[in-house]
Amino acid sequence: MNVTGVVENKSTISEVKRKTKKNLLIKIKKSWQLYVLFILPLMYILVFHYYPMYGASIAFKNFDPVLGIGGSPWVGFEHFKKFFESYDFVRVLKNTLGLSLYSLIAGFPLPILLALSLNYVYSKRFKKAAQLITYAPHFISVVVMVGIIFMILDPRGPINNLLSLFGVKEGINFMGEADYFKSIFVFSGIWQNVGFGCIIYLAALTSVSPELHEAAIVDGASKIRRIWHVDIPGIMQTAVLVLILNMGSFLDTGFEKVLLMQNPLNLSSSQVIDTYVYNVGLVSALPQYSYAAAIGIFKSLVAFILIIASNKLAKKVGQDGLW
């Protein structure tokens, strides 16, 4: 009897699997157009995002261009160990984390504040003018932006001319002082991107129910109280998602801008992981491709850990994460 029961169970399971497979095929057949559309982005991701990961294997090899990626000998974690034990490791990591943290703390809340303030501007003409003025710098190229920074902060430029009115007789070489580099980099980035960054929060504010504001006004709430108790909770989910996405690129300090602003006088403060990889991997007299790839993988691993941690933290404080 037991043998008969086992056979019946197996038969039932196989019947359920067959029906599930059949239902799946029916669903695919009904929506074949969507699956055809899905093939194109899938192929793009596989070819341009997953296939190049094969090249990252040189981080675990002594890459020789003559032997190629497949023929180069394996060395394990030797290049990672070399980076951790190098004299530059602490300085480069400290500069990268310092610049990223400074950018996050100073730059993250400002688009929210700008969006909240613009949301309460009743003059449409003023609102449009303010949005245009704040959005425009975002479309300036990095090269032009750095050129503007050099021109304004030149020892004989407008900033030093202004300071001379307050008794500062000797022009300050801002770009030649390592102590000024991080602040110049961060606040020029805020000026360039704060307007564009507030767009997503302005869109989120439109989803806040007007009835909540009407109820708050009836209760005698001031604008500050309405911002604190109605608007901020309404855009909190968006802010958390933006923060998690920012954590994914936490160590991406902006390679082009850092490289263009970098000079021998501020190198102690401006040498970050991206520029270090560029220097040792491409422009040095003896390019170290495997060493540079190992540093790049280390950076990606740190970013991956940060995005996982921030996603879990968001869930713990009661917000929805990315997944």
Image (tube, helix red, strand yellow):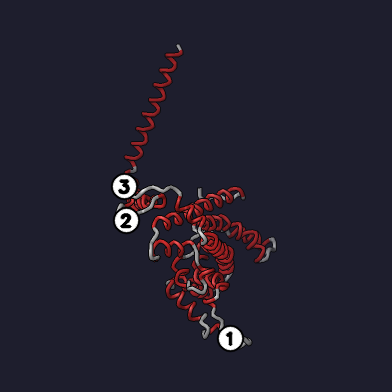
Disc 3 marks which residue?
Answer: 36
Give the amino acid type for the residue marked by disc 2 in the picture.
Answer: Pro
Which residue appears farthest toward the top when viewing the image? 1
- The quarter in which the N terminus is drawn is top left
3D distance between C-alphas at marks 3 and 2: 39 Å
Q: Nearer the viewer, mark 1 or mark 2?
A: 2
Does label 3 or label 2 sit earlier along the sequence?
A: 3
Which residue appears farthest toward the right when viewing the image? 220
Q: Position of residue 288 (x, y in %)?
A: 40, 59
Which residue is found at the position 32% from the left and 40% from the top? Answer: 29
> For numbered disc 1, what is the local secondary structure?
loop
What mark, if any, has residue 170 been given in the picture? 1
Q: Nearer the viewer, mark 3 or mark 2?
A: 2
Q: Please, is residue 254 above or below residue 241 in the view?
A: below
Disc 2 marks which residue?
Answer: 65
Give the amino acid type for the residue marked by disc 3 in the picture.
Answer: Val
Which residue appears farthest toward the left when viewing the image? 66
Does label 1 or label 3 sit earlier along the sequence?
A: 3
Does label 1 or label 2 sit earlier along the sequence?
A: 2
Q: Are marks 3 and 2 in contact (CB under 8 Å)?
A: no
User: Does 301 sit left or right of 233 as displayed?
Assistant: left
Q: Position of residue 49 (x, y in %)?
A: 37, 53
> For numbered disc 2, what is the local secondary structure?
loop
